[in-house]
Amino acid sequence: MPDSIAPDFYAFDSLLSEDERQVRDTVARFVDERVLPIIAECFEKERFPKELVPEMAELGLLGPTFEDYGCAGLNNVAYGLIMQELERGDSGIRSFASVQSGLCMYPIHTYGSDEQKNRWLPAMAKAEAIGCFGLTEPDGGSDPGTMKTSAVKKGGDWVLNGAKMWITNGSVADVAVVWARTDEGIRGFLVEKGTAGYTTRDIPHKFSLRASVTSELFFDNCKIPADNILPKAEGLGAPLSCLTQARYGIAWGGIGAAMACYREALAFCRERVLFGKPLIHKQHMQIRLADMVRRITLGQLLALQLGRLKDKGEMHHTQVSLAKWNNVRMGLDVAREARDILGAGGISVECSPIRHSMNLESVITYEGTETIHQLIVGREITGVAAL
Ligand SMILES: Cc1cc2nc3c(=O)[nH]c(=O)nc-3n(C[C@H](O)[C@H](O)[C@H](O)COP(=O)(O)OP(=O)(O)OC[C@H]3O[C@@H](n4cnc5c(N)ncnc54)[C@H](O)[C@@H]3O)c2cc1C
């Protein structure tokens, strides 16, 4: 098995089409050549490598599943493999792509007017415009139905007031997809950078996703033109449908982070000689490495079946919850295990497991915490909502 696809214990590669493999290998090369050489320093210095964004656009990684507006028209398995490889680099890079594609281009594509689509989608695919998605508020993200941000109709336009918190790409975004309470229920608005009363502030001192921008958004009597409401998005179901898209990609991303950590732990165990032999000779180390392969293999097969269901239009959002829960938990457990295997050196940012493990502390919380996904699955199998 080539190192570049390890671990592949169940001939996962053979389940992919030639096109899917090609997409994965192209993104893998981009990650190896452009992300990995700089990402430790970006993480340490809390810098989002914005210079990589045009290259991601060039490779067709932004909005890749759309067939129009200059997008690549890939299937959902290929999209998942993109997310896997980007997160093998860093969760922050994958988060950027997830937000741009799943949380911004998707709602504009699904709920937007023709004018909105023509204006934003080609520009977002080319990275000429960056998007962010404002749902979470300071008073709690798990229960977005209680949001306080409001929009009131005034003349033909809307007046937006409130605040959003923990918003990926916030201060670098040219357009924010913002969800607000209105007389007509929850609606989505496209808030453009430079709108009077719209300000952002980056959230400092993060120990996680340090190579990603996370911001607060503030709306103080922002006048939003009537043309900037998403005409087909009505009710909480619209933002939740966007989350389903992004969570699908995250389920693949967890595999990428775990693959990076597993490879590093295995390489270390081959080289590190203790008590007269390399660590791979120790039963306990073999069991720990075998357990990583077990977990990653299960995650791969789960994600692939989810992708095949999505491509057939048969995926249910509760299946996405189970996959996001399982694969992010799996990635976090593998990353922590790999960190420990690397010994003291494992606490250095020069090794990837500590960075992946710190990143995955965010990933397990955002886009629905692990608990929320467990309760979504619980509701599905019992018929009782315990949220
Ligand atoms: C780095 C980062 C980037 C993010 N990017 C975005 C973004 O781009 N856009 C966006 O809108 N949001 C974003 N978020 C916000 C994220 O989605 C929220 O943090 C998440 O939904 C949880 O909300 P909260 O942090 O307010 O926690 P809370 O909702 O306050 O939850 C606190 C705790 O209570 C638990 N809990 C909640 N409900 C129940 C229940 N019924 N029973 C038992 N336990 C429960 C939770 O699991 C959690 O442990 C981001 C977050 C981070 C960390």
Image (cartoon, grey):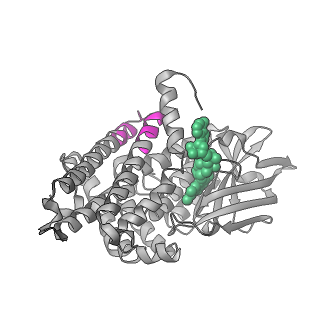
Asked which quadrant contains residue 116, the reply is bottom right
Find residue 103 and report its horizontal and vertical position in percent: 55, 52
Residue 315 vs residue 222: left or right?
Answer: left
Who's the residue at 52% across and 21% down the image? 383
Q: Position of residue 226 (x, y in %)?
A: 77, 51
Residue furthest toward the front? 275
Asked whether 311 falls inside the magenta stretch, the response is yes
Q: How many marks?
A: 0
Q: In this view, does 278 lie to the left or right of 181?
A: left
Residue range (magenta): 306-324
Q: Split into 4 quadrants, where in the image is the N terminus? A: bottom left
Above or below residue 13? Residue 271 is below
Seen from this angle, which residue lies furthest top?
383
In depth, the one of 39 and 117 nearer the eye is: 39
Q: Is residue 123 magenta?
A: no
18 lies above or below 47: above
Residue 62 visible, this angle: no
Task: Name the main secondary structure of what is drawn in magenta.
Answer: helix
Residue drawn at point x = 12 percent, y = 60 percent: 281
Answer above or below: position of 42 versus 114: below
